Amino acid sequence: MEIMWSHVWLCAISLLVVSVTMWIYRWWNPKCKGILPPGSMGLPLLGETLSFLVTGNSIDIHPFVKERMNRYGPLFKTSLAGRSIVISTDPDFNNLLFQQEGKLVEMWYLDSFAKLLRQDTTAASGYVHKYLRHVVLNHFGVETLKGKLLPQLEYTINRGLQEWAKLPEIEVKDQCAAMIFGFTAKHMFSYEPEKSEENIVGNFSNFLEGLMSFPLRIPGTAFYRCGKRQQKIIKLITNLLEERMKSHPEARGDFLDQFVEDMRTEAFLTKEFATHVLFGILLASFETISSTLALALKYLSDYPTLLQQLTEEHEEILKKRKDGNPRDGLLWTEYKSMTFTHYVINESLRLANVAPGILRRVMKDIHVNGYTIPKGWAIMAVPAALQLNPNAFEGPLAFNPSRWKNIGSNATAKNFMPFGGGNRACAGAEFSKVLLAVFLHVLVTKYRWTKIKGGDLVRAPALGFANGFYVNVSEKDA
C-alpha cells in the first residue's frame, strides 16, 4: 500500500512539474502568428514589473526603458502587472498608432487604471467620445477661454499667490495642484473646498503611486490606498450629482448642469458614467499641469538669465498696456503675443512628460519592421523617449526654451506629444497652456521666489521630485 501511494505521489508531483514547466515555457514564449519583437517576459505573473517600478534618479528616460532600447531597439516586448505589452519608442510607429485609433488600436489601461477609472469610461469611442470632447471644449475650449476663463484664471492665480506669500515656504507642486484643482472643480461642479468636510485635494495627492501599482486590493498596498481615496472622491461627486438632479436649482452653467440636462436624452450618460468622467478629468488636470508648473519654476530658479528674459517679456506687456489702454486684466491678444513664454511652456512640457507611457490595445495583428504584435496585446508609447530624442532635440536633457525658435512643426509632429495624439489628443490642451502662461505672467510681474530646498527630479516611473520642491514667495512691492 505504501509503495502504491508513493507511486501516486510521484506521478502527481511529476505531472505538476511538467504542467508548471509547460506554463513557464508558454509564459516565456507567447503564441504569435509571426515573430514577436525582441525582449523578455520576465518572471511568471510578475513579469518585469518590479524593474519597471525602480526609481530613476534623473529627468532622463526611465532606466527600464533606456536599458532595453539599447539592448533591443525601439520596439521590445515585456510583461507589466501580468499583461503582455510591446513598448515603442519609435516616433514613426507611434504616430501611426495614434492616426489609426479605432482601426488598429483602441484606448486601454493597465488593470490598475481600468479598475479605478473604469475602462468603459476612459475608452469611450465613436459618438460617446465625440460627446465628451464637445463638452470639454464647450467649458474649457478657446472660445470660453477668450470670453470668460482668462480673467477668472488671472484672478484665481493672483489670489493663490497672495496666500503663498503669507507662508515661510510652500511645496510648489502640492500648492499648484490645490490651486488648479480649486479652479477646475469650481467650473466642473461648483465645488467650494472651504464648504466641504472632505479634503478632496488631499485624496488626489500622489494618486499616480497607486495607478502604477499591481491591482491588489490588499490593505497596506499602494493600490488599496489609491482605491480608498478614489472611493471618497467618487462619493462626493455622486452626492453633488444627486443633489443637483433632485433640487433642480438655478442654472450654474457648469459640467454638472450639462450632464444633468443631457441625462434625459443620452442613454449612455448614467450617473455612474458621469461621476467617473468628472473624476478622470479632475485627475488629468490635477497631476499634469501642477507637475509642469513645478518643473518650470525649478528650471527658472536654476537659470536666472532665462527668468530675466521671461520677466522682461511680461513687463513689456504691462508697459504697453499702461501707455495705451490702462487695464488690469490680460487680453487674449496679449496671451498670444507671449513668444518667449510659449517657448518656456513648450520646453517645460517637453521635459515634464509625467506619465510613463500612453497605452493602446491591439485590435488586430500589427506587422511592423518584420515583427508581429498580436491582437489583444497592449502597446505602450513612451513620450519621454520621443521628447528626449537627441535626433529631434539637441542636448535633450538641457532646459533650453530658445530651441523652439528654430523648431518647425515637421520636427515636432512625431516627437512632441504632451497632450497625446490623433483623435484622442487632449481636448483641454489649450486650457492647460493658457493656465501655464497666466500663472507665469502673474508670478514674474507681481512676485519673486527663492528656492528653499528640494528640487531633485526622479522617475518612479512617473516624473516627480524626490523630496519635493520648496520655495519662499514674496510680493515685489512689499
Image (tube, rainbow, N blue to C red):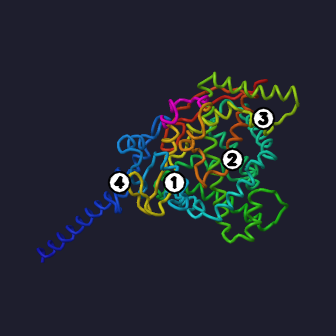
Using the numbered discs, state the Cα–Cα distance from disc 2 to disc 4 in whole angstroms: 39 Å
Query: Is the Cβ of the residue at disc 1 closer than 8 Å to that at disc 3?
Result: no
Magenta region, residue range: 389-403
Q: Residues within 10 Å of mark 1 (few under 14, many from 20)?
A: many
Q: Magenta includes 392?
A: yes
Q: State the image quarter where residue 452 is shown.
A: top right
Identify the amino acid type marked 3. Glu
Q: Where residue 363 sits in the image (x, y, percent)?
A: 48, 63
Residue under the image location 77 percent in, 39 percent down = 154
Identify the amino acid type marked 1. Leu
Residue under the image location 57 percent in, 45 percent down = 417
User: Which residue matches tag 4?
Assistant: 41
Apparent side of residue 132 relative to residue 40 in the rendered image (left or right): right
User: Which residue matches tag 2?
Assistant: 181
Using the numbered discs, state the Cα–Cα distance from disc 1 to disc 3 in whole angstroms: 37 Å
Q: State the image quarter where residue 24 is shown.
A: bottom left
Residue under the image location 82 percent in, 27 percent down = 320
Above or below for 274 versus 446:
below
Q: Counting residues from the N terminus, which is met first, the one under dot 4 or under dot 3?
A: 4
Identify the amino acid type marked 2. Phe
User: Which residue matches tag 3?
Assistant: 334
